Every structure is written in structure tokens, then in C-alpha cells.
Image (cartoon, rainbow, N blue to C red):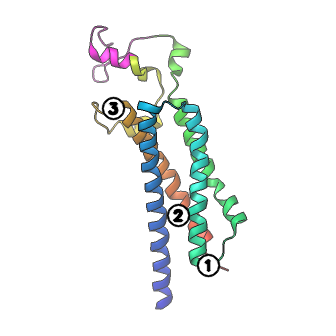
Amino acid sequence: MSTAKEAAKREASKLSLSLAGSLLFAIAVCVFIAVNRSTIGLPALAIAISLPLVAYGYSLALSAGSQYITCGTVNIKLISLQNLLVFGLNALVCGLLYLENLPLKKYFLGEFPPFNPLTGLPLDPASMEYTKAMETENHYKLQFFSGVVTAVLPQWMDESLKEGLVYCYWIFWLNMLPLYTLLGLQTTCG
């Protein structure tokens, strides 16, 4: 009976650590992206390169702490190798989000007016929506992964906050799921 309780306790602590750790990291990324886009102005490529490295370091710290608390020792070589999964997934999604922010349609199809998403007709060049669309150039971007998140966000929301929430969503899931799995492997003492 006590073995089942201990296993349930380990499972709950693994879930809460991966959930809380990923949520805190995703919120920090959201704030950083929103503030960066509106004030700091770091290049998007620098973010796409540095964010997976920071996620990898953060996951190493969580894994090492969890293994030390559970087992009393830390096997840093094994943790470093296993947490490359977190790095790889974050690098993949950051690369895709970076490519989505490039106006690729403009390069391949040339310039064209933005369209009204409800009617499908081109916007009037004298309208405020046209001016805003031409500033952001969102009609030139592919936005598959970002569209999953921005589809449920209100239209009036600031573009920098929208981008921050896109990163928050994808970074949360691409840290939480592998971390949960890796913590299960890494906290098996033996």
C-alpha cells in the first residue's frame, strides 16, 4: 500500500514540477517577446537562436534539481544528453516561428493588397485596417503555427502581445511534454 502511495506521490511531484516549470518559463518568454518587440528591438533571428539554448539550460537545472532531490546524486552526462530533446524541439519551433514572421509571400508573389478576412475582398487603401495591415505585413506571412494561437485572440490586441502569446503557447507545450517524460526517466534511481 505504501509503495502505491509513494509512486503516486512521485508522479504528482513530477507532473507538478514539469507543469509549473514549463508555465513559469513560458510566461517569462511571453513577457520577454512582448517587451522586446515593443521596446528593445532584438532581432528575431537572435531570439530564434538563443531561446532554445535558454530552454535547454532551464531544463537542465530542473532535471538536475529533481534528480538530486529524488536520488541524492546527479548524473549530469545522462541529463545533458536526454535534455537535448528539449533543445531540439525548441529549436524546431523557434525556427518555424522565425520563418513564419518573414514576409515570404511578398518575396514569391510580389506585393498585393491585404484582404478582409470576413468577406475575402481587398481592403480599401483609405481605411485604417489597410494601413495597419500594411504596417504589420501579416498578409504576406504564412502564419500556420502562429495562426493556431492568434485565431482565438481578440482583433484589438496589440501585435507584440499576440506574438508573445504565440511563443508562450508553443514554448509551454514543447517544454512541458518532454520534461514530464524526461523527469520520469531521470528520477528513476538505480
Q: Front-most of 66 and 154?
A: 66
Q: Earlier in the sequence, mark 3 or mark 2?
A: 3
Q: Is residue 22 left or right of residue 188?
A: left
What's the distance in space between the residues labelled 1 and 3, CA to CA? 46 Å
Return the x and y of residue 11 as percentages of the image width and height: 48, 74
Mark 2 element type: helix
- Kind of residue at badge 2: Tyr
Q: Front-most of 109 and 178?
A: 178
Residue 133 falls within the magenta-colored stretch:
yes
Q: Is residue 142 left or right of residue 124?
A: right
Label 1: which residue?
A: 71
- Kind of residue at badge 3: Asp
The image shows a total of numbered marks equal to 3
Secondary structure predominantly adopted by residues drawn in magenta: loop
Q: Front-most of 19 and 51?
A: 51
Residue 135 falls within the magenta-colored stretch:
no
Label 3: which residue?
A: 158
Residue located 31% across and 13% down the image: 123
Q: Is residue 115 left or right of residue 62?
A: left
- Kind of residue at badge 1: Cys
What's the distance in space between the residues labelled 1 and 2, CA to CA? 17 Å
In this rendering, which labeled residue sits more in front, label 3 or label 2? Answer: 3
Q: Earlier in the sequence, mark 1 or mark 3?
A: 1
Q: Earlier in the sequence, mark 1 or mark 2?
A: 1
Mark 1 element type: helix
Toward the right, the furthest residue is: 77
Residue 130 in the image: above or below residue 76:
above
